[in-house]
Amino acid sequence: MESNDRQSRIEHLPWTKLGDAATWQTQLPRTKRLRYNPLRESMADVFSKKKRSQVMAAIRSNGNKDTELRFAAMLRAHGINGWRRNQRLPGKPDFIFRSARVAVFVDGCFWHGCRWHCRMPKSRTDFWASKIARNKERDREVGRLLRKRQWRVLRFWEHNLKSPDKVIDKLRTMLATRTKQP
Ligand SMILES: [Zn+2]
């Protein structure tokens, strides 16, 4: 979790200063955009909202763990070997295939801002929007860093796991083609 100080700084940023968060909002259907009103939040709401979003964060981070475990189960079910987890690389890829130099991320639809399934929480929406925008920016940066080190990066959405065959096909194709070793 962020420190309270940082949270409150983010919350009081004018909408225009949220940069990527604002741009990203414009890509959403009008009905799903955030209505930002800095005057709306009263002091009385703050603590209950904080508590609520802590609870939400706990639930969502469990969801993330679940996604990784489901992906691991899919790999096993399809007899795909040679992967490792928790390796020290930029962005800590969820799975890596060292010999094929493929790094795989399975992105949660909420945390990484999937355009179809990321439902903004009704409370502290500006806080969540800027957090997710930063996650997206970090994803891009991590991709650049990994590619610089001759890793190929494969990202799946959590919702892709509903079509395991497509995911496995894509992964197999990438594993079958090896880049030249530096
Ligand atoms: Zn999704």
Image (spheres, rainbow, N blue to C red):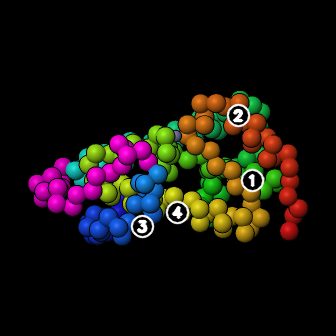
Residue pointed to by mark 3: 19
Give neighbour class at mark 2: few <14, some 14-19, many 20+ (Cα, 10 Å): few
Q: Residue at x 35, y 42 (%)?
A: 31
What stretch of residues is rendered in magenta? 28-48
Give neighbour class at mark 1: few <14, some 14-19, many 20+ (Cα, 10 Å): many
Q: Residue at x 58, y 43 (%)?
A: 157
- Mark 3 or mark 1: which is in front? 3
- Amino acid marked by disc 2: Lys
Please give the label number shown on residue 102. 1
- Amino acid marked by disc 4: Glu
Along the horizontal axis of the image, is 27 left or right of 99?
left
Magenta-span inclusion, residue 29: yes
Q: Secondary structure at mark 1?
A: strand
Instruction: Give the CA separation, mark 3 to mark 1.
Output: 31 Å
Which residue, as the protein is rendered here, is positioned at the far right?
180
- Amino acid marked by disc 1: Val
Q: Is residue 54 visible?
A: no
Compared with 7, 56 (above or below) is above
- Mark 1 or mark 2: which is in front? 2
Residue pointed to by mark 2: 166
Mark 3 or 2, nearer chain start: 3
On-image quarter of the N terminus: bottom left
Residue pointed to by mark 4: 137
Q: Secondary structure at mark 3?
A: loop
Instruction: Give the CA separation, mark 2 to mark 4.
Output: 26 Å
Please give the label number shown on residue 171. none
Q: Secondary structure at mark 2?
A: helix
- Amino acid marked by disc 3: Gly
Determine if the C-beta at disc 3 is less than 8 A from ligand 1.
no
Q: Secondary structure at mark 4?
A: helix
